[in-house]
Image: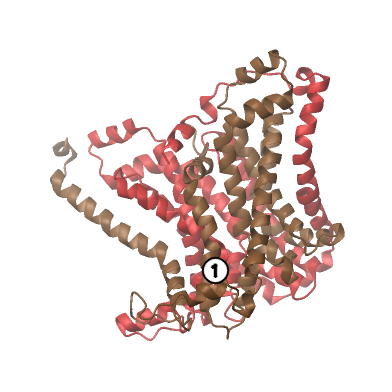
Chain colours: A brown, B red
Amino acid sequence: MSVAFGRARPPYRLRRLAGDTGAVVLAVVLLLWWLLPVYNMMLIALDPEGKTAFTGDIWPSAPTLEAFRGVLFQRYWYLQDFWHQLGNSFFIGITTMALTVLIASLASFALGRMRLGRGGVISTAALLIYMVPAYFLVIPFYLLMHTYGLMDSLWAVIAADVTFAVPYAVLILHWYGRLIPMELDEAARIDGASPGRVYLKIYLPLMAPALAAVGTYALLTAWNEYLYQFILLSSPRNKTVAITLATFFDNEDTPWNYPVAASLLYALPPIVIFFAVRRYIAAGLTLGGVKG
Amino acid sequence: MSSTPQVLAAGRGAVKRSWRPSWHRHLSGSEFAWAIAFIVPYAAVLIAFAIFPIAYGFWMASSPSLYVQLFASDEYWDAVVSTALYVGIGVNATMFLALLLSGFFMRRSRWVKALLVVSMLPWALPAQTAFISFHWMMIYWGFLNSVLEKLFGIHGPDWLTYYWLALGANIVASTWKTMPFWTLILLAGRMAIPQDLYDAADIDGANGFRRFVHLVVPLLANLYLVCTLLATIWMIGDFNTPDLVSGGAPVDGTKVLATLGVEYLLEQGNPGLGVAVVMTGLPLLIPLGILLIRRLHAREVQL
């Protein structure tokens, strides 16, 4: 064949060796690329004075965990509410997750299993909202929260996060729900189960992987979201770690090891959660990505 | 990761859809009440927190004088140019690199799979953490300049005081953060290409490059287009990267529409003008959205 193709190819083993070497080189470059910003933060956090320059040592010569201790025991004045604000972040994240799973599963049950309305219209509407960048609504949202009396309230942030997570969740659950045979529902209905019972006893257990995916998605977006928290929350007791960190960085003369250490600690929960449930997330993200 | 192919294989087309009558002929009275009760929370959230704010936004930005004021300011046109450059370069660089990278992840060894898990780290990291790190690498006494000096003896520039370098920093940071997500989506698309096609190409003597051009590119074209459209829409609405990485430096040069709108609200107390900034993006966004929805409904691709 290769003769007919008119071009000599190097022997298979040589090609394979070259390919493998290339892959290893690429992998090293990629690892550097992905980890460099995190590595940079580790260096700053471990430096006793929080210097941002690279000293030339790959591992810092005098590393200290003082910054992490300072954050955890709230020793630095800027971070005196760290645990409380971390609690606020958790409250927003977990409430968003619970509400998203509840609202989206109810809606997708009504749309997909009870055949309420035409799925096409609803999924197009959900898609439209999903596509709207969150930032587009931030100004009217901000003014409406004034009207609703929800300024400086964690619930305003939760409302925003739920609004942007639910359409995506409905889409994913709607698609995933098609994998579950309708006959199960129909059998239960014939046995006299109400729609509520079918939802609780059949739909929710069978949808568990998809619910885990959308729940984690909602939790991660709420945790990583910054603009709405920044705009909507103002009093120290209602602030979250995300905003405190951002205000920190406006202040050029603060020792930078503290905010960096806090920022790294703040990044831990989403990373732990992500890697714990990555199977579901990957399935959720790419669910229906391409028709088989 | 292992469940992904099965899920993909069982997409929309794999499930036979039987024809069913719409609800008004199908649902009886009590069932209809149940269905309505189930849909009410969803509808209430969308109406109160999405549709109402959208309508309110349109009403706020309905005065023509706002646009006269906006179009007369240099600041606005600077932001338009910066947004166009940021999104135009950023989206295409991200998507093209993601396409190439997804090919790398098709390799079957175990360590490549482990690497794929690590690659999701930027995506899972909170934006504040990641972008602040980028910001500090680029400042004068930052990581980048000290590495340049230690390794090559070069005195680096003050990166964020030059327009193109600051814009480049934003683009690089955005690529760093979003590329893993698109790589994963395109990887899923590649995995859905039947192995027979690769085998056939192999027998015909196609090398890696020809296989990419004649097999992968045509088959992934639709998915690639959809991802690019979605990435464009999201990047136009990206507030975090320009705000946290360059912070608009130098002298508000790299400010984009997203940060300009929020600035009008918070610093100038002029929410109407802020919404007007958003509205001027609509002539671009609406066609993109329509194209995207049509592509999604066309067939083959869902997201």
Amino acid found under the numbered disc labelled 1: Ser
Residue B291 picture quarter: top right
Residue B189 at x, y = what percent?
Answer: 44, 40
Chain at tag 1:
A
The answer to whether A201 is drawn above or below residue A259 in the figure is above
Taking the image as drawn, is residue B258 in sight? Answer: no
The answer to whether B63 is drawn above or below residue A160 in the figure is below
- Asked whether, in this view, residue B22 is left or right of residue B189, the answer is right
Say which residue appears at 42% left-offset and 44% top-offset. B187
- Front in this rendered view, residue B212 or B72: B212
- Asked whether, in this view, residue A72 is left or right of residue B258, the answer is left
Mark 1 = which residue? A263
Kindly state the secondary structure of the residue where label 1 is placed. helix
State which quarter of the image contains the C terminus of chain B.
Answer: top right
Say which residue appears at 57% left-offset and 83% top-offset. A254
The single residue placed furthest to the front in the displayed view is A73
Residue B294 picture quarter: top right
The answer to whether A272 is drawn above or below residue A262 in the figure is above
- Front in this rendered view, residue A127 or B48: B48
